Amino acid sequence: MTPHFKGDQAAIELTDFSVFYSQDSVAAVEAALKEKGSKIVVERGQIVKVSKDKDGVTSREILTKSWTDWVDYWSVDFNFESKREIIRVQSPETNEWEETWTGEFIFENEWQSFRTRKNRALELTSAWHQCQPGRRKIAVKVVDIFGNDTMKIIDVNIEGKK
């Protein structure tokens, strides 16, 4: 991902995403597949459709043509460390409930792009977002087509008057 700046505004461009899943083996599926059958296999980050025709001839079709085929949803928090994750815990000594910071932060979804069944397009650059000048962390969350999410945090310095 690449951050872009325009004064005190920032935008994030999603430039790459990769997975390294493997589920089943293409060779094993080919051997076990019945005639006129097909199965989807994930091998080394590619989704492959393995088919066997009526004559027993197998074929492979790679269904993921681009890295963007893996992305179902992505979103940006332009000031990731602005909201601490606070939980309530009961003190064993006093039996009172106390609020405690977990040491983590809450991801606030300030911009997003996602696919729908009707619209498969995905925006790869976020909208421009006004930011307070200074150092901050921008978090980008990507959810793949299997529902697994990945988050990357980028340290940036927003220019402008403080």
Image (tube, grey):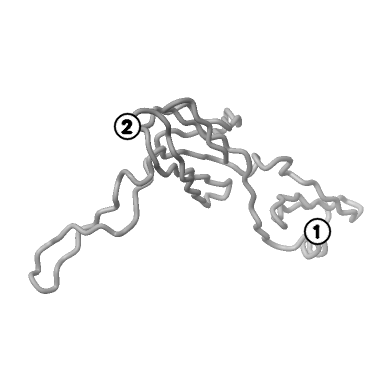
Q: Is residue 88 left or right of residue 76?
A: left
Q: Are marks 2 and 1 in contact (CB under 8 Å)?
A: no
Q: Is residue 30 left or right of residue 81?
A: right
Instruction: Indicate which disc residue 71 carries.
Output: none
Q: Position of residue 63 (x, y in %)?
A: 73, 44
The disc labelled 1 sits on which kind of residue? Lys
Write down the quadrant of residue 65 in the picture.
top right
Towards the viewer: 138 or 22: 138
The residue that appears at 83% across and 55% down in the rendered structure is: 35
Q: Position of residue 90 (x, y in %)?
A: 16, 66
The residue that appears at 52% across and 49% down in the rendered structure is: 147
Label 1 packing within 10 angstroms: few (<14), some (14-19), many (20+)? some
The disc labelled 2 sits on which kind of residue? Lys
* Residue 125, placed above or below residue 48: above
* Residue named by callout 2: 162
Which mark's residue is nearer the viewer, 2 or 1?
Answer: 2
Instruction: Find numbered disc 2 in the image and state the secondary structure of the residue it sits on.
Output: loop
Label 2 packing within 10 angstroms: few (<14), some (14-19), many (20+)? few
Q: Is residue 138 left or right of residue 69?
A: left
The residue that appears at 52% across and 46% down in the rendered structure is: 143
* Residue named by callout 1: 34
